[in-house]
Image: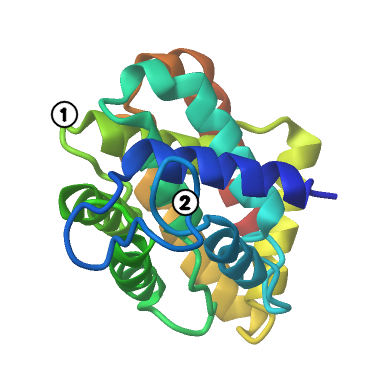
C-alpha cells in the first residue's frame, strides 16, 4: 500500500524547489501560502493522488508513481533539474484512460494549468509539460538529460525480476480488458518488437549498466509467450 502522506511530502518538496514566490501571474505568494511563498502544495498533491487512484487503473497507480519517483532519486545525478523531472513524473500519467490515445497530451495540459497557479515559473512549467509529452515516445535526444532520466525511470519496470514483470504485464492486460485477446496480443507484440528494435532502451549510464540486459530478456520472453 502506498504511503500517501510520504507522497504528499515528496510532491511538496519538488514543488517548493521549483517555484519562485510571487513570480509572475498565477503564482500568488500572499494569503494562506507556505513559508517559502506560493499556495499550499497539499491541495495540488491531493488532486493528483485522487487521479492516480482512479478505478480504471491497474498498473498506472500510485505504486507506479512511487516507483518512478524512487528511480528518479537513483538517477538524479544525471538530470539537469531533478525536481522538474519529479514534477513531470507526478503529471506524466495524471490523466489516464486506457481507451483513449491522448492521455499524455491531456496530462501535459493539466500541468500547464496547475503549475503556474501553484507558483511554478513559466519556464519550469513548460519543461514539465515537455517532459510529460516525451513519454509518448520515450525517445529523448542525446543531450536531453532530464528527458533521459524521466524516460529511464518510467521504463525501469521492464527490468524487473520475473515475478514483478509478470505482475506488470498482468496489470497492463487488466487495464485493457475491453480489447479482445487476439487484438491485444497483436498490439502488445508490436510494442515489444518496437522496443527490442531500439539501439538502447535506457539512455542514462546507470540504466544501460543495470537495466538494459534484463529488460531485453524480459521483453523477448514476453514476445515469445505471446507468439505461442
Residue 36 lies in what quarter of the image?
top left
- Category of crowding for the residue at label 1, using alpha-carbon neighbours closer than 10 angstroms: few (below 14), some (14–19), many (at least 20): few
Residue 47 in the image: state x and y as whole percent. 58, 70
Residue 108 lies in what quarter of the image?
bottom left
Tell whether 180 sits left or right of 174.
left
**Above or below 139: residue 210:** above
Res 113 label:
none
Q: Residue furthest front?
A: 31
Residue 173 lies in what quarter of the image?
bottom right
Residue 99 in the image: state x and y as whole percent. 51, 84
Res 192 label:
2
Dot 2: element: helix
**Above or below 205: residue 91:** below
Along the line of sight, the residue nearer the viewer: 191 or 25: 25
**Above or below 77: residue 80:** below
Instruction: Give the residue at x 50% y 66%.
Output: 94
Q: Nearer the viewer, mark 2 or mark 1?
A: 1
Circles 2 and 1: CB distance less than 8 Å?
Answer: no
Instruction: Give the residue at x 27% y 58%.
Output: 129
Instruction: Give the residue at x 17% y 59%.
Output: 24
Tell whether 17 sits left or right of 56.
left
- Which quarter shows the C terminus? bottom right
- Category of crowding for the residue at label 2, using alpha-carbon neighbours closer than 10 angstroms: few (below 14), some (14–19), many (at least 20): some
Per the model, the C-alpha gap separating discs 2 and 1 is 23 Å
Along the line of sight, the residue nearer the viewer: 151 or 31: 31
The scheme the figure's colours follow is rainbow
Give the number of callouts: 2
* Residue bearing mark 1: 142
Tell whether 207 sits left or right of 61.
left
Along the line of sight, the residue nearer the viewer: 144 or 76: 76
Residue 61 in the image: state x and y as whole percent. 67, 60
Q: Is residue 196 visible?
A: no
Amino acid at each position: 500500500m502506498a504511503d500517501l502522506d510520504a507522497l504528499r511530502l515528496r510532491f511538496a518538496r519538488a514543488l517548493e524547489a521549483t517555484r519562485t514566490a510571487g513570480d509572475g501571474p498565477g503564482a500568488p505568494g500572499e494569503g494562506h501560502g507556505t513559508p517559502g511563498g506560493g499556495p499550499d502544495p497539499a491541495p495540488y498533491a491531493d488532486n493528483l493522488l485522487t487521479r492516480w487512484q482512479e478505478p480504471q487503473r491497474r498498473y498506472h497507480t500510485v505504486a507506479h508513481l512511487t516507483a518512478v519517483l524512487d528511480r528518479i532519486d537513483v538517477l538524479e545525478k544525471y538530470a539537469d533539474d531533478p525536481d522538474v523531472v519529479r514534477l513531470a513524473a507526478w503529471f506524466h500519467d495524471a490523466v489516464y484512460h486506457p481507451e483513449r490515445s491522448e492521455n499524455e497530451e491531456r496530462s501535459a495540459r493539466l500541468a500547464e494549468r496547475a503549475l503556474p497557479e501553484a507558483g511554478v515559473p513559466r519556464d519550469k512549467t513548460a519543461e514539465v509539460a515537455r517532459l510529460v509529452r516525451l513519454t509518448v515516445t520515450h525517445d529523448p535526444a542525446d543531450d536531453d538529460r532530464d528527458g533521459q532520466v524521466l524516460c529511464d525511470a518510467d521504463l525501469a519496470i521492464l527490468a524487473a525480476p520475473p515475478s514483478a514483470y509478470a505482475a506488470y504485464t498482468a496489470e497492463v492486460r487488466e487495464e485493457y480488458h475491453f480489447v479482445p485477446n487476439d487484438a491485444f496480443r497483436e498490439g502488445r507484440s508490436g510494442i515489444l518488437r518496437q522496443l527490442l528494435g531500439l539501439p538502447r532502451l535506457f539512455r542514462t549510464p546507470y540504466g544501460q549498466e543495470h537495466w538494459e540486459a534484463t529488460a531485453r530478456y524480459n521483453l523477448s520472453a514476453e514476445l515469445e509467450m505471446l507468439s505461442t
